[in-house]
Image (cartoon, helix red, strand yellow):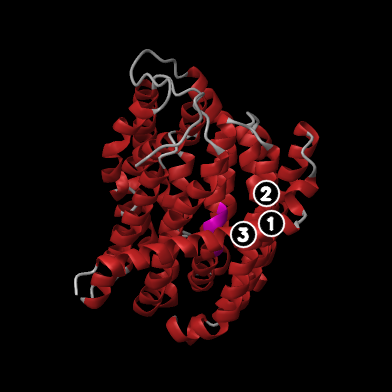
């Protein structure tokens, strides 16, 4: 795999689109696999079993962010900026993540009854899922270092491998009649760390970086300090995405959580391009800041997210009852509200990556903290009477508030006008069309080459 840098080690803008495309592909496979898995889970487990599974998975997902203390993102930041003593950074962060995983596992094992809403079966599922916490944290550290190296191919391979293992395991369990909440939790938990195998190439890629010294003394004070500033934002961000699934079961019951989980699974497809843009922009802006590149990334990301969301809404009324069953039909209006929140919060999520790359991750943390507070308050008010729909409305309000505050911070602290991120331009449509034509042209060239080299 090739890496592209300027002589001074910063990434060239010519390859930004290629990195985003590669990362988008890696981000696309997991939600597509999730769409295939979701009907199997819904039909095999029912509404209640699907809610129990969602409760356990939500705890594991939040725990992987909470116990990481921002170290994977700090690795990305320091590796992208300095590229000195990467081996030392990895060793120090690995030791910290190992300790955090052991302590976090013990704490969550004891806290499982409090997180289960009084359901003994959910207690067992949470304790089963949390066994994956420590290896998942260590893989997260490798992923953070790979992002700093611009090794997006490895990260995509990691995500694709995890998604395919999850898909294969759930499908085999369903075909054999062995798919239960317990077996589903185990299959999904393994996928959190199975991608570790792809990072065997990371040391070789590190040695290719300009000015890199793979080994040497390094102080973890700066690494840990940056991680701790960024950590509240990372934690509140994942809580903003998963607080509804953590709290909906005790507030409205596992049946409503099952409905909401299906809608959230489908809605995650709309996040694919935005997630790729945030990852690449954070690394690129950490190495070399460019407000016009940041603005274009936010606008084009929003445009693509709108198109994807519109397609999902158009298909959902037919697809949800067809593939999930009529019991899950209430998930359709919930999905529409979740997608509205994704679209409205999209520019601000890219702005948040820009804040972190400019050394102000604390501002993003404040935005997400305010949004989480609004989300939880609305969830407590609306989940009881409105169930899954109340949770969706709370999520929409949180996304809009977080995104708006991130855009405001960029304007106030770095004089980047909101219109640069929010106001569509004719050039955005041209750039999007040019990218599609380029991708189509490459596919056509490859197809012609395959035909000409095929033996009759």
Residue reaching furthest to the top: 217
Q: Is residue 256 above or below residue 291?
A: below
Q: Is residue 392 above or below residue 95?
A: below
Instruction: Tell me the CA gap for discs 3 and 2.
Output: 11 Å
Chief secondary structure of the magenta portion: helix
Q: Is residue 375 visible?
A: no
Q: Tag 3: Cα neighbours inside 10 Å, few (<14), some, or many (≥20)?
A: some
The location of residue 409, given as percent across then percent down, is: 75, 38
> Decide: marks 3, 1 in contact (CB < 8 A)?
yes
Where does label 3 land, which residue? Answer: 432
Question: Which residue sits at x=59%, y=45%?
Answer: 236
In the image, the segment drawn in magenta is: 270-274
Instruction: Tell me the CA gap for discs 3 and 1.
Output: 6 Å
Mark 1, secondary structure of its residue = helix
Where does label 1 land, which residue? Answer: 428
Q: Nearer the viewer, residue 127 or 141?
A: 141
Q: Is residue 284 above or below residue 263?
A: above
Q: Which mark is residue 296?
A: 2
Number of marks present in the image shown = 3
Inspect the magenta stretch and tell me whether residue 127 lies in it: no
């Amino acid at each position: 795999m090739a890496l592209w840098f300027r002589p001074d080690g910063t990434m060239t803008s010519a390859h930004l689109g290629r990195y985003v495309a590669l990362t988008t592909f890696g981000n696309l496979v997991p939600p597509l696999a999730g769409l295939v898995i979701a009907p199997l889970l819904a039909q095999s487990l029912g509404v209640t079993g699907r809610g129990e599974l969602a409760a356990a998975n939500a705890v594991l997902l939040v725990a992987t962010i909470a116990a990481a203390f921002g170290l994977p993102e700090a690795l990305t930041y320091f590796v992208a900026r300095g590229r000195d003593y990467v081996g030392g950074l990895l060793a120090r962060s690995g030791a910290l993540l190992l300790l955090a995983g052991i302590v976090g596992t013990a704490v969550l094992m004891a806290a499982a009854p409090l997180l289960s809403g009084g359901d003994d079966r959910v207690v067992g599922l949470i304790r089963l899922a949390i066994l994956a916490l420590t290896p998942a944290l260590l893989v997260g550290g490798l992923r953070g270092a790979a992002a700093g190296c611009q090794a997006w191919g490895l990260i995509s391979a990691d995500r694709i491998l995890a998604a395919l293992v999850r898909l294969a395991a759930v499908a085999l369990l369903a075909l054999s009649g062995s798919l239960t909440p317990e077996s589903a939790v185990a299959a999904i938990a393994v996928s959190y760390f199975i991608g570790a195998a792809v990072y065997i190439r990371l040391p070789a890629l590190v040695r290719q970086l300009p000015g890199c010294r793979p080994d040497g003394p390094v102080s973890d004070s700066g690494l840990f300090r940056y991680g701790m500033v960024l950590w509240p934002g990372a934690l509140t961000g994942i809580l903003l995405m998963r607080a509804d699934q953590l709290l909906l079961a005790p507030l409205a019951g596992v049946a409503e959580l099952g409905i909401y989980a299906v809608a959230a699974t489908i809605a995650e497809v709309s996040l694919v391009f935005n997630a790729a843009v945030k990852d690449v922009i954070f690394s690129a802006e950490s190495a070399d800041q460019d407000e016009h590149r940041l603005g274009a990334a936010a606008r084009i990301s929003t445009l693509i997210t709108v198109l994807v969301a519109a397609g999902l809404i158009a298909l959902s009324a037919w697809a949800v009852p067809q593939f999930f069953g009529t019991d899950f039909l209430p998930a359709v209006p919930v999905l529409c509200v979740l997608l509205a929140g994704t679209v409205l919060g999209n520019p601000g999520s890219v702005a948040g990556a820009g804040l972190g790359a400019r050394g102000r991750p604390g501002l993003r943390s404040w935005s997400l903290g305010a949004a989480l507070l609004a989300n939880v308050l609305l969830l407590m008010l609306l989940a009881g009477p409105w169930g899954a729909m109340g949770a969706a409305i709370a999520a929409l309000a949180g996304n809009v508030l977080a995104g708006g505050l991130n855009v405001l911070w960029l304007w106030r602290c770095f004089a980047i006008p909101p219109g640069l991120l929010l106001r569509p331009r004719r050039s955005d449509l041209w750039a999007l069309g040019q990218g599609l034509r380029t991708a189509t042209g490459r596919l056509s060239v490859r197809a012609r080459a395959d035909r000409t080299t095929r033996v009759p």
